[in-house]
């Protein structure tokens, strides 16, 4: 019986080594997947922000284009121009990361 212990001990040691290697590979794969998920989440957040930005931009353009025919004096034109410039400034600040 005492002769079997070293024999099994070597097999157990080899199996432990294999298990540790597999565990190491698994941990590495988990970290890689976490990074990919993090990147995917950032992508979809930016995509949603972009879609909202486009919707708001289109809404503003339509609103401004509907105001243009009704402008009857310089003050109204300046007011619309100021509004457009303000939004343009906000857009410029949004595009800077």
Image (cartoon, grey):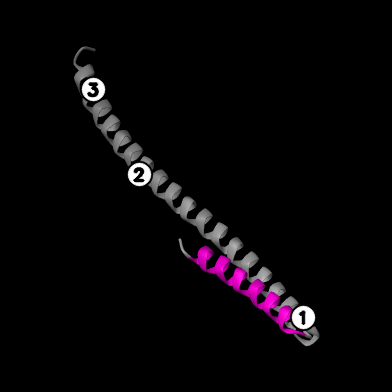
Category of crowding for the residue at label 3, using alpha-carbon neighbours closer than 10 angstroms: few (below 14), some (14–19), many (at least 20): few
> At 54% across and 61% down in the image, what residue appears?
46
Residue that badge 2 annotates? 28
Residues at marks 1 and 3, CA–CA distance in whole angstroms: 86 Å
The percent coordinates of residue 7 (x first, y second) are 21, 23
**Residue 26 placement, left or right of 83:** left
Sequence order check, earlier mark of 1 and 2: 2
**Residue 48 placement, left or right of 37:** right
- Label 2 secondary element: helix
Contact between marks 3 and 2 (CB within 8 A): the answer is: no
In front: label 3 or label 2: 2
Reply above or below: 70 against 17.
Answer: below
- Label 1 secondary element: helix
Reply above or below: 31 against 17.
Answer: below
Residue segment shown in magenta:
73-95
Sequence order check, earlier mark of 3 and 2: 3
The percent coordinates of residue 23 (x first, y second) are 35, 37
Q: Nearer the viewer, residue 64 or 17?
A: 64
The percent coordinates of residue 86 (x first, y second) are 61, 69
Residue that badge 1 annotates? 67
> At 75% across and 76% down in the image, what residue appears?
63
């Amino acid at each position: 019986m005492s002769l079997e212990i070293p024999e099994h001990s070597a097999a157990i040691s080899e199996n432990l080594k294999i298990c540790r290697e597999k565990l190491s590979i698994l941990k590495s794969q988990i970290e890689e997947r976490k990074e990919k998920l993090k990147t995917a989440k950032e992508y979809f957040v930016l995509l949603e922000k972009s879609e909202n930005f486009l919707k708001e931009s289109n809404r503003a353009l339509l609103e401004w284009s509907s105001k243009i025919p009704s402008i009857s004096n310089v003050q109204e034109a300046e007011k619309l121009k100021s509004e457009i410039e303000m939004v343009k400034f906000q857009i410029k600040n949004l595009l800077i990361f």
